[in-house]
Amino acid sequence: MALLYVTDLAYPARGRRYGDEDTFLTSRLRDRFPLALCHPLDAAGLMGAFEAVVVRNSGPVLHYQDAYDRFRAAALAAGTRVYNPLTGRGDMAGKQYLLDLTAAGLPVIPTVDDPAHLDRLPQVPLYAVKPKQGADSIGLEFTAEPAGPAGAVLIQPKIDFAYEVSFYFVDDAFQYALYAPDPARRWELRPYEPTAADLDFARSFIAWNTLDHGIQRVDACRAPSGELLLVELEDLNPYLSLDLLPPDTRDAFVTALTRSLASFLAA
């Protein structure tokens, strides 16, 4: 079955090489699937000629929100198969999940979307404030007095965490983990060996998201208390940092992705 692989090979990602990653992935997926690459702005117009669409490193959709909304609406109306499926409850659906998980008492950085609700957060010297419809730290600021229209911003306590760690999954199967030892250098990643408790933490959010197929990245930080807190559940187009993996781990990931896509197309 022919795949339309959506990517922006020229997107200038800070600390990441989107084009290299997707060039590698498509070179391997071609061994199993006929495919063509297109820019996200062209996806809605081209997808009708393909059996399925694979959305990969296409940059934050806020840079082309109208085009993405048209693509999503057209795919849902036509019943087009999209990988990841468009039923994700994480970043694919916006940032509301951070508020929902906070309200449910799950291990996430506490989040509100109204400065009037600061009393629901831990008292700290500084708060992180960013647009609710944001991505990639765009518009992020730290302030002692958060402000902004209710419902338009996300407000979180600024946490002096030890490090950030990301857990990568294909479907519900854990593949590998990477972490940034220096909190100031988010994309200088090293291999991370998760504990059983770490994996239980990450898997709880994969289970919450209920995607049958797809690539997901669970981003977390190690709080001063030692616990992991969710930073982001990336289920739209997570960057995978495949260039940092040992060859056998990278090959295992490609094998898992190929099997997942084959199962998705056969369903």
Image (cartoon, rainbow, N blue to C red):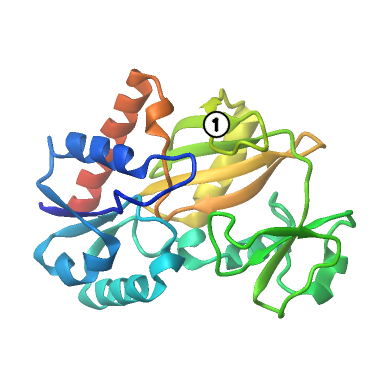
Q: Position of residue 175 (x, y in %)?
A: 42, 32
Q: Position of residue 238 (x, y in %)?
A: 43, 48
> Quick check: 113 left or right of 122?
left
Q: Where is residue 118 in the image (x, y as percent from the top left)?
A: 84, 68
Q: Which residue: 59% across, 55% down?
A: 137
Q: Is residue 129 above or below residue 19?
A: below
Q: Which residue: 59% across, 68% down?
A: 96
> Quick check: 259 left or right of 202?
left
> Quick check: 109 left or right of 146?
left
* Quadrant of the image occupied by residue 23: top left
Q: In this view, does 129 lie above or below 34?
A: below
Is residue 267 something that shows in the picture? no
Where disc 1 sits, the SS reads loop
Q: Identify which amino acid the numbered label 1 is placed on.
A: Glu
Q: How crowded is mark 1: few (under 14 residues within 10 Å), some or many (20 or more)?
A: some
Q: Name the residue under label 1.
A: 188
Quadrant assignment for the C terminus: bottom left
Is residue 241 something that shows in the picture? yes
* Quadrant of the image occupied by residue 67: bottom left
